[in-house]
Image: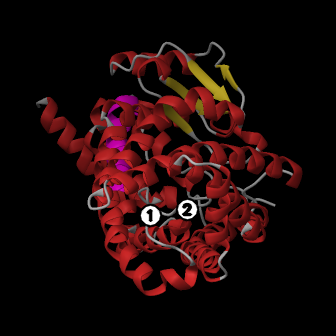
Amino acid sequence: MSITMLAASAAAAFDVDAATRAYLAMVEGPVRARSDAYFEGGYWLLLWNALFGIAVNWALLHFGWSARWSAWAARRVRRPALRTMLYWLPYVAVTTLILLPWTIYTDFWREHQYAMSNQSFAAWSSEEATGFALSLIVGALAFAAIYAVIRRAPRSWWLWGTGLTLAFVAFGPLLAPVFVAPLFNTYTPMAESPLRTEILAMAKANNVPADNVYVFDASKQTDRISANVSGLGPTIRISLNDNLLNRTSPEESKAVMGHELGHYVRGHVWKLIGGFALVFLAVFLFAWFAAPRLLARYGARWGVRDVADPASLPLLSILFTIAMLAATPLTNSIIRVNEIEADAFGLDAAREPDGFAQVAMRLSEYRKLEPGTLEEIVFFDHPSGYNRARMSMEWKARHLAELPPEQRALQRPAPLPVKD
């Protein structure tokens, strides 16, 4: 009998449905109820975050605060770029302060309510302060660059604004691993172990130019498992968090790292930039079309002369928020398609279908396990746990004859424990 016939015979004997259901049984009862409630609540948070942001920015226009900040900045500096950067300081400070109670609820209280956070309020506040400082610096540079384009190319700033935004997005993967990530976590080289050797062997086999693996202390923030292959060129690094090492088996960790290597090998950074270029182009075009018309009608009441006035930022923020909310199904789908591709790559690279299926169940502690088709398209930026487990078991069925004997049996993993 040929190898092909043996593989087909083995696949026919393996029950993909039963194997998938065995993994889904890991997330049942209170664990699934909590997961579904947490994730479904996030649907409403998308809407409420947008509405609160719109309301705050509308208030800045309606009560004339934005116009006064612009005038204040103009009195102190002559250069337009410095004026926009100076305006940014009260804008980001006041909006952050007004939205702080909502931020505390969504990012701290709710995370503790669902046992998703390990941080004290002091530790959480310290990280929020660090993020705020970064937004002051990076936001001011981006804000000044966008408004420079608006001043110099009033008819085509939507196009140049898209290009600038993509440039900032592209620099993120290059700079973040070296300058941003260490502000929130400590990265240390992974200790010598068979798992480290296997990860580096997978990297070498797939031409990923990394010669070390780093571990970061995410457990101080959350129990979520995570890993990434980040950076570009000289800043590339393979990283995994301590939760992945402490909460999963070597097979699961290897499966996760195969997936992360897939993002790098398949060039997903560039694919995402390309996909989001179309989204940003539509968003900027919408703002370019709508902003002058709204200012023509309400600008005098708000004290905003034209779009080139920094005081127009709240209006642009409102328009961007509306457009990005409407684009949610598209942006989620762009990301999800790349995640599916990385899943397939990881299964081929790591050859750990049961490890990956089990990881998918662990991720379903906070991600709804079995959404409807439309629900997954609209709200999921990663494949659901069900689809990931089924993909893993389908891969296993196709390659059953090639796997070691101990991997061929139908696995029945234990249910996940209920968190306190």
Instruction: Locate the C terminus by quadrant.
Output: bottom right
Q: Is residue 337 magenta?
A: yes
Q: Position of residue 287 (x, y in %)?
A: 37, 69
Q: Main secondary structure of the magenta part?
A: helix
Rendered residue at 54%/54% (across/down): 361
Q: How is the image coloured?
A: secondary structure
The residue under label 2 is which amino acid type? Arg
| Total number of numbered discs in the rendering | 2
Residue in the foreground of this view, choosing between 375 and 273: 273
Rendered residue at 36%/30% (across/down): 349
Q: Is residue 12 magenta?
A: no
Q: Quadrant of residue 102?
A: bottom right
Q: Position of residue 282 (x, y in %)?
A: 30, 64
The residue under label 1 is which amino acid type? Phe
Q: Quadrant of residue 47?
A: bottom right
Q: In this figure, which residue is indicated by the disc labeled 1?
A: 380
Disc number for residue 367 = 2
Q: Are marks 2 and 1 in contact (CB under 8 Å)?
A: yes
Instruction: Locate the N terminus by quadrant.
Output: top left
Q: Secondary structure at mark 2?
A: loop
Q: Position of residue 367 (x, y in %)?
A: 55, 62
The answer to whether 420 appears left or right of 318 in the picture is right
Q: Position of residue 4 (x, y in %)?
A: 14, 35
Label 2 crowd bin: few (<14), some (14–19), many (20+), radius 10 Å: many
The relative height of residue 397 versus residue 173 in the rendered view (above or below) is below
Query: Is any atom of residue 50 visible in this view?
Result: yes
Rendered residue at 45%/67% (across/down): 320
The span shown in magenta is 334-351
Rendered residue at 61%/15% (across/down): 193
